[in-house]
Image (cartoon, grey):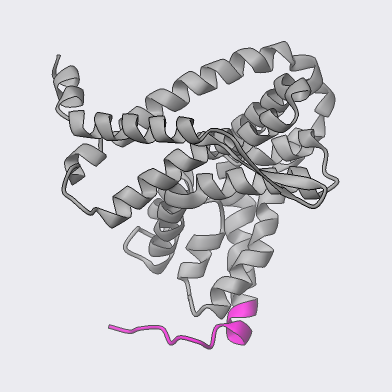
Amino acid sequence: MNKFKEIFSSWKLLITVLVIVMISERIGLLKIPIGSGSIMFLPLLYAMALGLILYLAKPVKWVNKEQTSMADKFIVIGISVFIAKVGVQSGAAIEAVIKAGPALILQELGNLGTILIALPFALLLGFKREAVGMTHSIAREPNVGFIASKYGLDSAEGRGVMIIYIVGTLIGTIFMGVMSSVLASFTPLHPFAIAMATGVGSGSMMAAASAPLVSMFPDMATEITAYAATSNLLSTADGIYMTMFIGLPLCNFLYRKLEPVLGKNRKVKTN
């Protein structure tokens, strides 16, 4: 009973979300043709963008901080329903998933490749040990917990992983949705390959990135959903081990090699 009271006490939040959803659905699917392809924008992206704008702008104190904290619980409920649907569809395409073989397992190594790009950029921007926390992984909840246990969240590495966690939560899903549409339209990558790439270990990011693929290739919708869901499951399961045994050691190794060369834009503050 207390849970229901807590939910209904956030009626302003519920109304705000309902209005955002109605506006987003009213806009509908938008396609921007560019050359031989097109970039697709789905209502999911508008809803996230509008919610982000309202949260950051805060023109009126219509929804307070305590009520916005309830949004996390609603997200869990929504993603749970989505994952259940995905699980049923994945079971229907289990043969296609099995045929993918090692590709689904080895694709996790692709996530480590971003370290080679992200870490040098972070150092060029002037970050020090924060760069290790920022670039060692996608910085979802398991990674935040791992860095917290190893370095502490009040450390430079802890501040770095929290920066990416917050940024990923706010705009990561929007970025993933647009990027998926762009890759499907302007690269020779197969839709199944892009679907596997959407499984980065975040349910919301996977949902936002796989939705454009399903809209663009409706005849492959079942297989795309299956590849995305299975990839996301594997990334969630083995991602933390990749971080522990490969990602973080690789990041620390590159930091020691690159920081003396690239990390000259900011001095480390000393107490």
Instruction: Please state, as top left, top right, bottom left or bottom right, where the N terminus lies in the image.
Output: top left
- Prevailing secondary structure class for the magenta stretch in the rendered image: loop
Camera-side residue: 17 or 119?
A: 17
Q: Is residue 178 above or below residue 10?
A: below
Q: Is residue 187 above or below residue 128?
A: above
Where residue 210 sits in the image (x, y, percent)?
64, 34
Q: Can see residue 236? A: no
Residue at point 66%, 27% (across, down): 230
Give the image location of residue 176, x and y in percent: 59, 46
- Residue shown at 70%/57% (left/top)? 113
Q: Is residue 20 above or below residue 149?
A: above
In the image, is residue 109 part of the stretch drawn in magenta? no
- Residue 204 or 249: which is nearer the viewer? 204
Q: Is residue 259 magenta?
A: yes
Range of residues picked out in magenta: 258-271
270 to 176, vertically: above or below: below
Q: Residue at x 41, y 83 (%)?
A: 268
* In-front residue for pair 58/268: 58
- Residue in view at x 46 percent, y 86 percent: 266
Q: Quadrant of the C terminus?
A: bottom left
Give residue 167's position: percent from left, percent from top. Answer: 44, 55
